[in-house]
Image (spheres, coloured by chain):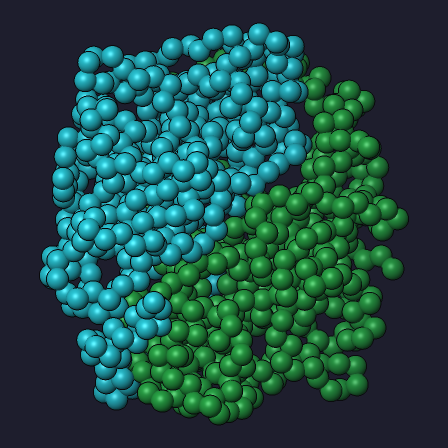
Chain colours: A cyan, B green
Amino acid sequence: MTTRRDILRGGLAATAGLAAGTAARAEGDPLITELQDWNHVLGDGVDANPYGMPSRHEAHVKRRSVEWLTADPVSSVNFTPLHELDGIITPNGLCFERHHGGVADIEPAKHRLMINGLVDTPLVFTMQDLMRFPRENRVYFLECAANSGMEWRGAQLNGCQFTHGMIHNVMYTGVPLRLILEEAGVKTNGKWIMPEGADAAAMTRSIPIEKAMDDCLVAFKMNGEALRPEQGYPLRLVVPGWEGNMWIKWLRRIEVGDQPWHHREETSKYTDLLENGTARRFTWEMDAKSVITNPSPQAPILHSKGPTVLTGVAWSGRGTIPRVDVTIDGGKNWHEARMSGPSFDKSMHRFYYDFDWDGTPLLLQSRAHDSTGYVQPTKEELRQFRGVNSIYHNNGIQTWYVNEKGIAENVEIS
Amino acid sequence: MTTRRDILRGGLAATAGLAAGTAARAEGDPLITELQDWNHVLGDGVDANPYGMPSRHEAHVKRRSVEWLTADPVSSVNFTPLHELDGIITPNGLCFERHHGGVADIEPAKHRLMINGLVDTPLVFTMQDLMRFPRENRVYFLECAANSGMEWRGAQLNGCQFTHGMIHNVMYTGVPLRLILEEAGVKTNGKWIMPEGADAAAMTRSIPIEKAMDDCLVAFKMNGEALRPEQGYPLRLVVPGWEGNMWIKWLRRIEVGDQPWHHREETSKYTDLLENGTARRFTWEMDAKSVITNPSPQAPILHSKGPTVLTGVAWSGRGTIPRVDVTIDGGKNWHEARMSGPSFDKSMHRFYYDFDWDGTPLLLQSRAHDSTGYVQPTKEELRQFRGVNSIYHNNGIQTWYVNEKGIAENVEIS
């Protein structure tokens, strides 16, 4: 068996790529042999940034919109630059946004959370009240149901930021929703909850009481600090593994009822139209999915051949990702990827495939397996059952074609 | 045994605090019954912030300096606002800074890493070269050896940001240093490495080859995105569990030698002066430590009595933290804290103690146990062996006094 060491050594020796180049540089590279400005000029002190920002050389690392996607004069969606990230934590400044009424600007001291409907005692909490409940810390992915939605009818968007960037993965701190509902006392006929946002869209969704009592959190922190405004500051509902628009932002009210409400965002939107004109509804759980983030159309291979790192992310709304397969030849041969980083329930996982590129064109795909045994399907398999009318819940296998110059593009193979 | 539910219910019933107040609000609070601006005015679109920032209502959450601590016109150290954070991830913008020559401003395309000294082949890597090695993702705390250093001679600084804020906890992506050293080929007499920074201070430290080959990383990403400039952009050495100044930032060179170099930062600095005039040297590992972050001098209790959440962080340079004890009466009674969040090797851990405050003054302490069986000592126990001449490696138990109004201050009890 070829080990990673062998691949690296072999690749280096065989291609005279990395090793020879790096040894040669030791002799004649002025950037290492000559004094540079930053080696002797005193840099900025700490007073420059009480809240730190990325390097000015990273200005290209940002959330991006797709111009033709939103009709509004003001965009309502942008995408996480997955191809610029690594590990499993999405930094708060780069978490994608999707708003139905813009970003509400709320002063925490004026925010309230009401619990009403089929409860023994209707309650209204201030933020300070909520700080008195026991808290938990958990890492979850949040994926918009429409992520990859533009790909139902074929390869369209050239970059994983656009095809798969409506996802982020964050460590939340919050109060288990169960504790708050128990505080109000849910009546025996209380079978559903309807969380409502305080923004101008007053977003609402229906959620079965079983999920509410299971793993939902009323969260006030993400990655250690307060929620960002665009993520629901000061309070959002976390609905692990379920589609993003149920994670109500600027959470102001939770009504308990005996049946679902069938509001706009769970009837005309967020239902999956099939070929025969009927629609799937309440398709809450996000199916297992993966995407190769490097190389990808926005992130070409920058060398000619030799040792190459392929990486990507995988996730499932039903559990963990014990395994991801990768192919570089369009499915002729599959290789089990190397996972690195924490494996949490309903969280993003990071995979790598370290290989020796021979410089010929590649057809890259990844295939996630989740802890229930489910295997990510091809787009064609999905279309056979679901048609191409929906924009939601496309978890098909993504293909990138990489030419001999290392340039990648979005393609489909049958 | 009293469960968390009982405490919460009991506390609410007994003190007529939370429940009565929250129920009363449901009837007459205009902030929930009347329409507010943010409920009907369209908010900002996503174009406002391609790289997102915290809410304007969180401006008080920032790194802070201590004015009298640095003689320079430009400060060279600031502190993480631990009392404003939760969970275990420190967001990049709030990771404390400590510089010896300011923040180097380096364009990644011009950055080089040289491996030289006792190696078979001296090598110089570009950033792109390093991207071709296999990567790993791991979460580690970084603590400055001088964290809590001002407390050796008694309680001085009123806030955990200042007494314990020279620490952060981050998920790194990087190449195992072992792979890079093996690429150059370490000669049999190569027993130490000397990493060097590219900043104007050209920081250097001596590290035994065993540590270098064990768990060190050459890291280029923190919490998913590129290292921040003040954390060594574009490249830093990660030396898990060891004192912060060994984690060389702006890493430009690693020399392999047969003995330590005894440079300035491991002789006149970062050695621990004892009472008898001799000094401990090479005190690399950070001993197990903990601190209560809420309540604390910067974060008073905001209610009069009833259900109260106490929280804090604990860490060890030698492993995990399976247990933290908490006392609210100055050590008369100790309670095992509730841990919540991931437990990683050499990473920060989050603990909670949910209790029913009777409104009388409190003497708060926390005591960490690490996975080696080591127990965090009192400051007095430390002073018996180490005197008070050093500023480094103070991991003594911290005490906060909280008065009946919920105001906390830094005190010591014998």
Q: Quadrant of residue A135?
A: top right
- In this picture, residue B61 sits left or right of residue B410: left
The residue positioned farthest toward the front in the image shown: A1
Q: Nearer the viewer, residue B325 or B67?
A: B325
Instruction: Say which quadrant the C terminus of chain A sits in.
Output: top left
Residue B368's place in the image compared with B200, above or below, is above
Instruction: List x then y, in percent, for residue A353.
Output: 31, 58
Q: Position of residue B47 (x, y in %)?
A: 27, 38
Indicate left or right for B170 with A200 as reference. right
How many discs appear? 0
Q: Is residue A93 above or below residue B147?
A: above
**Can residue B392 be seen?**
yes
Across and down, in percent, residue B252 comes to 37, 77
Quadrant for the N terminus of chain A in the image: bottom left
Q: Position of residue A176 (x, y in %)?
A: 58, 30
Residue A43 visible? The answer is: no
Q: Residue at x 53, y 56 (%)?
A: B169
Which of A362/B297 is in front?
Answer: A362
Which residue is drawn at the image coordinates 30% and 70% (left, top)? Answer: A7
Query: Which residue is found at the position 40% from the left and 38% from the top?
Result: A373
Q: Residue at x 69, y 50 (%)?
A: B292
Taking A100 as reference, is B366 above or below it? below
Residue B229 vs residue B387: left or right?
left
Query: Which of these two is toward me, B178 or B100?
Result: B178
